[in-house]
Image: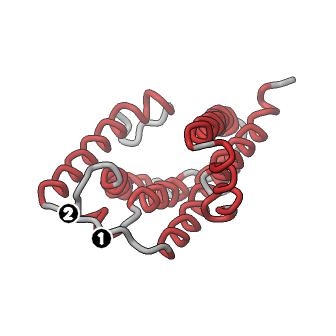
Amino acid sequence: MNPDALALPALLLGLLLFLGLHSLRIFAPAWRDAQLARLGEARWKGLYSLASLAGFLLILWGYAQARLLYAPLWLAPAGLRHAVALLMLPAFWLMAAAYVPRNHLRARLQHPMTLSVKLWAFAHLLVNNSLPDLLLFGGFLVWSVLLFRSARRRAPSPTSATLAGTLLTLGVGTAGYGFFAFWLHGAWLGVRPFGV
């Protein structure tokens, strides 16, 4: 079978698998808890991680192939690329805030990783305009909105914050942004955000 014919189905299957698994707390918490009790924490986490990795790899392969096959659905103004570059810096700060302890972003927002994914997906939808782009970035945008709404309904966990933690978060996020924008994005995806 022609690999091109498998690209879009692989992307869709990967999105369903990856985002579906990461939506169990929203749509099927009782089923998730039952499986966790039946399998035990170690087996559940192992199976969950393997299935998530399979979904992620399907997304990567399917999107990489499918984006070469589909024409743009509309023309995106070239100037929007600057907006994407600008929006990605706070997205990296938010992602760092999910991991760096005791920072004000996490203490204030409670769910910075979900907000990071939301900002990443929205920014990329501004300049990526084919069917595979809509499926990938639109899928992650809808998922992050639903996940954030669900997480906000739960009682917030108290989190302390320090200036040092916040400065470290901004430093780690900025370094990650620079590394990704000036090297990894081009090396991994073939697209250089700043053309260098």
Quadrant of residue 172 within the rendered picture: top left
Residue 77, image x, y percentages:
50, 58
Residue 13, image x, y percentages:
74, 43
The amino acid at mark 1 is Arg
> In this rendering, does residue 17 appear at all?
yes
Quarter holding the C terminus? top left
Residue at (47, 29) in percent of width and height: 188
The amino acid at mark 2 is Ala
Q: Nearer the viewer, residue 31 or 97?
A: 31
> At numbered mark 1, what does the secondary structure look like: helix, strand or loop?
helix
Q: Nearer the viewer, residue 96 or 187?
A: 96
> Mark number for residue 108?
1
- On the rendered structure, is 120 left or right of 22? left
Residue at (75, 40) in percent of width and height: 8
* Mark 2 Cα-neighbour bin, 10 Å: few <14, some 14–19, many ≥20: some
Residue 56, image x, y percentages:
60, 38
Quarter holding the N terminus? top right
Q: Is residue 145 above or below residue 190?
A: below
Q: Is residue 191 above or below residue 38?
A: above
Residue at the limit of the structure toward the right, as seen here: 1
Q: Are circles 2 and 1 on residues that touch, CB within 8 Å?
A: yes
> Mark number for residue 161?
2
Residue 115, image x, y percentages:
43, 62
* Mark closer to the chain start, 2 or 1: 1
